[in-house]
Image: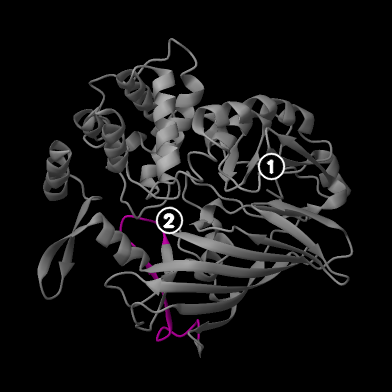
Amino acid sequence: MRKLKMVRKFLSMYLLFPVVVLLLTPSAGYSLISEDQLLDRTFRIDISTITVSFDYFPWEYYVDCRAVVEFTMRPGQSRPVIHLAPAIRDSNVVNSITLNGEALNFSDESDVRIIGFEGTTQQAIEFQRDLEADTVHTLDISYRLTLPEGYPRFSSKVHDLEGRGNEELFPTINTPHELARHFLTFRVHSDTPFRCIGSELMMETFSTVQEWSLDTERELASYTVMFVLMPEEDTILEERIIGGVHVRIMAYIGGASIDTAFDRLEQWLPELETNLGPFPMPRGLSIFLVSSGATRGGGMEYYGGTITTLGALEHEVFHLYYGCSTVNKTFRDSWMDEAITMWYENSVDPEYSPIPENYMSNIVSGRSPIAVGFDRRAYTKGAQIMEAVARELGGRAEMIAFLSYVHGNYSFTPFTTLDFLDYLRDYSGVDMTDRFLNWLYMGDETGYAAGPASRRSSHEDEVDMTPPEGLLKKYGIYNKRRPK
């Protein structure tokens, strides 16, 4: 423990910009701040609830939205920010906005400004009001989302590798450690019956409009919230109970095989429960199964669900343990989610090799903790790092027992890479600090970190939600890639 604290102090003083940041202040010159202080200065607010109503007009290709966000200010912060990407790109999408009951003009810089952050492509909406600490504040925004013309589908479409989340659809803070309870209502204004599937989803039908409500029932990261709305006649929906888990699978007619997916889950879900613990989602598993490809294709995990191809099904369901319930603190720490998932898949091969002792990289240190996305090397080198941990613990079974311990004790408690080393030492007495520093912090391979030249895993592909060609032709769409 003393050694790890000394290393962290050393890193804080000399090595990693992401751990301790040098700031220039007008009155005091240069000052050092911790990573926690940097996160607070960047994201500024802690959200308790996000309540959004979506009125979807599928044949007009737009959604009218109203969002109410309740939040408090983080320590030492007074001027709030929020992420809502469509409004940042075009202020005209905002119809009205109030902060604590005061109407603001989105186009007036004395009320609202768009700001950026050094070390990241992320931008935020900054409200030009200083708010009190230890008080619940309320932001109320009405806005319109314009959808691409083509196939009538409204859905979440997160890409965590790039750090693109649900800030494309509703106001939130786009960082893994910001956990909030979500209440979402979807209303479809159409005579065509629609079907909806997603995280913790329940349906209510009224005589004049189709309506569904989603309550995450607990605080979780916004980018893990999933929903999909599509015409009912274009889809197949089947539900089964597997080992006590309520599984719902929706797929396009003429698309991927639901029976094949269920066959795989009949083996996969019991295995995960045996190895890692009870299924972590209280209301089961919702899957939107896309594409007909059985061996390749992208996917994305969500809380209580996944949008995935058959080729990525097991990978994405594993992420419900590591990625959606066992949560990392920043996007750059999310290398561990992919590393652990890929390790679990690869390590069934007795010839699978650990990372070389002399390997050095900047998988973690190459990114700021406030940057979006994570390093592609997580899928390959990261998995080999986890194999090195497994060798230290005694093998695959011992590593799985450790992962079960971490999941059971630290779910929904966002942690960093260095925290993971603490958990390892507390669990086993194994101290891998020096090796982790070389493997993740000391290298300078910046050209390989996110470049297209790196060897891609199929799980890195962005999930393609394009319907089968027969459905596209039904709607007069002949360019298969158009409605992506």
Visible in this render: residue 407?
A: yes
- Report, in whole angstroms, how far the alpha carbon at label 1 lies from the one at label 2: 24 Å
In the image, residue 108 sits, relative to residue 335, either above or below, namely below
Measured from the top left, where is residue 193 in percent x and y? 87, 58
Query: How crowded is the residue under tag 2: few (<14 C-alpha within 10 Å), some, or many (20+)?
Result: many
Q: Residue 287's mark?
A: 1
In the image, residue 126 sits, relative to residue 450, either above or below, namely below
Identify the secondary structure beneath mark 2.
loop
**Is 48 positioned to the left or the right of 393 in the image?**
right
Q: Nearer the viewer, mark 1 or mark 2?
A: 1
**Image marks 1 and 2: residues in contact by CB distance under 8 Å:** no
Measured from the top left, where is residue 387 in percent x and y? 37, 22
Query: How crowded is the residue under tag 1: few (<14 C-alpha within 10 Å), some, or many (20+)?
Result: many
Which amino acid type corresponds to the residue marked 1 in the rendered image? Ile
In the image, what residue occupies the spot 22% across and 21% down?
Answer: 358
In the image, what residue occupies the spot 79% across and 36% down?
Answer: 255
17 magenta-colored: no
User: Which of the pair 285/142 is nearer the observer?
Assistant: 285
Identify the secondary structure beneath mark 1.
strand
Measured from the top left, where is residue 265 in percent x and y? 67, 29
Q: Main secondary structure of the magenta part?
A: loop
Provide the residue span drawn in magenta. 105-122
Which amino acid type corresponds to the residue marked 2 in the rendered image? Thr
In the image, residue 166 sits, relative to residue 276, either above or below, namely below
Q: Which residue is mark 2?
A: 175
The quadrant in which residue 293 appears is top right
In the image, what residue occupies the spot 16% across and 49% down?
Answer: 12
